[in-house]
Image (tube, rainbow, N blue to C red):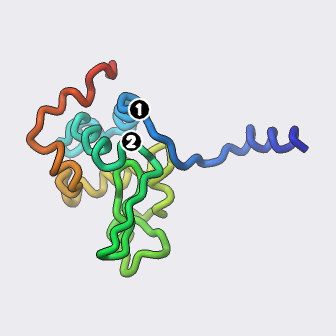
């Protein structure tokens, strides 16, 4: 029985939700996915944003009691506007994704949705970026990453 389970695991990989990435691993991955310079937003700005929004945790969630929405994933993308979690009232799902997809460790859906947000609203859509990154020297966010 253990052998059959192991074979199933090897041939049918599961989608993994939730990992805390290192700063440099995150920077490398989002660069691979085309976020560096996307709509004029530097890689360092994206890394700073993720540091302050989720501390690089792909499974981070934050419930917003004022509108009963939840922020999901490494970019803390809001369920009222951008994804569907089957519980947020009057949600619009602007990215056309399930909120759980924003927590996947491969970051593909999270990056696609972040691109959609920055196209429509700019990087200032994220409060964490406005409060901690805007107007600051961000060179330290990429230091030692060998990009």
Category of crowding for the residue at label 1, using alpha-carbon neighbours closer than 10 angstroms: few (below 14), some (14–19), many (at least 20): few
**Residue at point 42%, 58% (across, down):** 61
Asked if one can make out residue 94 in the rendered structure from this viewpoint, the answer is: no
Which quadrant of the structure image shows residue 65? bottom left
Q: Quadrant of the N terminus?
A: top right
Which quadrant of the structure image shows residue 89? bottom left
Above or below, comparing residue 95 to residue 108 in the picture: below
Tell which residue pokes out farthest to the bottom in this image: 90
Q: Is residue 3 left or right of residue 103?
A: right
Mark 1 vs 2: CB contact within 8 A: yes
Q: Secondary structure at mark 1?
A: loop
Residue at the spot of label 1: 22
**Residue at point 23%, 34% (across, down):** 44
Q: Secondary structure at mark 2?
A: loop
Category of crowding for the residue at label 2, using alpha-carbon neighbours closer than 10 angstroms: few (below 14), some (14–19), many (at least 20): many
Q: Is residue 132 left or right of residue 59?
A: left
Residue 29 screen position, x and y as percent: 41, 34
């Amino acid at each position: 029985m253990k052998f059959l389970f192991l074979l199933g695991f090897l041939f049918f990989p599961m989608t993994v939700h939730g990992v805390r990435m290192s700063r440099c691993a995150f920077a490398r991955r989002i660069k691979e996915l085309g976020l560096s310079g996307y709509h004029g937003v530097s890689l360092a700005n994206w890394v700073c944003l993720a540091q302050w929004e989720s501390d690089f945790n792909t499974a981070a969630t934050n419930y917003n009691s004022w509108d009963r929405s939840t922020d999901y994933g490494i970019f803390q993308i809001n369920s009222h506007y951008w994804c569907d979690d089957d519980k947020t009232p009057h949600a619009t799902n602007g990215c056309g994704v399930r909120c759980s997809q924003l927590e996947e460790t491969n970051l593909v859906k999270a990056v696609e949705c972040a691109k959609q947000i920055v196209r429509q609203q700019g990087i200032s859509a994220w409060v964490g970026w406005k409060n901690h990154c805007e107007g600051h020297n961000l060179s330290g966010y990429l230091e030692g990453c060998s990009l």
